[in-house]
Amino acid sequence: MDANPIPTPADIDSEQPVPLDLPIQWLWDMLDEFVYQFQSFAQWRSVVKNKSEDELTMLAENPQIWSCYSVLNVLYSLVQKSQINEQLVAEKNGSSPEEVA
């Protein structure tokens, strides 16, 4: 039997994380896209001259949208949950990163 079977609807509706292993390339692509979307929005937000009044009002009323603080918080949480720092230290010390994960 597979260690990580395909999640059922009951798994998805549960309060617990879904036991799912994603390919490393998918994880990289999701992280890369997240950072790209932040960077694109930040560039768009910084150019005021081509914005409509509605867009300017929306930006003024919602300064927290894609804020640097919230993006860094998501990235920091990802680092903490992935235990990547501990894995890198283990690898540097000649241990297996899987032992830490």
Image (cartoon, grey):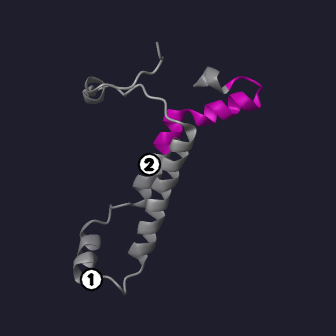
In this view, the residue farthest toward the front is: 1
Does residue 12 appear left or right of residue 45 in this picture?
A: left
Please say if 65 is above or below 87. Answer: below
Q: Which residues are magenta?
A: 76-96
Which residue is at a point 72% across and 30% down the rendered structure image? Answer: 91
Please say if 59 is above or below 26. Answer: below
**Mark 2–mark 1 CB contact (< 8 Å):** no
- Which amino acid, mark 1? Ser
Is residue 83 within the magenta segment? yes
Judged from the image, the secondary structure of the residue bearing numbered disc 2 is helix
Q: Residues within 10 Å of mark 1 (few under 14, many from 20)?
A: few
Judged from the image, the secondary structure of the residue bearing numbered disc 1 is loop
In depth, the one of 2 and 65 nearer the eye is: 2
Q: Position of residue 34 (x, y in %)?
A: 46, 54
Does residue 5 appear left or right of residue 28 in this picture?
A: left
Q: Position of residue 15 (x, y in %)?
A: 28, 26
Is residue 59 within the magenta segment? no
Please say if 45 is above or below 28. Answer: below
- Which amino acid, mark 2? Asn
- Per the rendering, the mark at residue 52 is 1
Label 2 or label 1, whichever lies nearer to me, is 1
Pointer 2: what residue? 73
The quadrant of the picture occupied by the C terminus is: top right
Report which quarter residue 65 is drawn in: bottom left
- Sequence order check, earlier mark of 2 and 1: 1
In depth, the one of 94 and 69 nearer the eye is: 94
In this view, the residue farthest toward the top is: 1
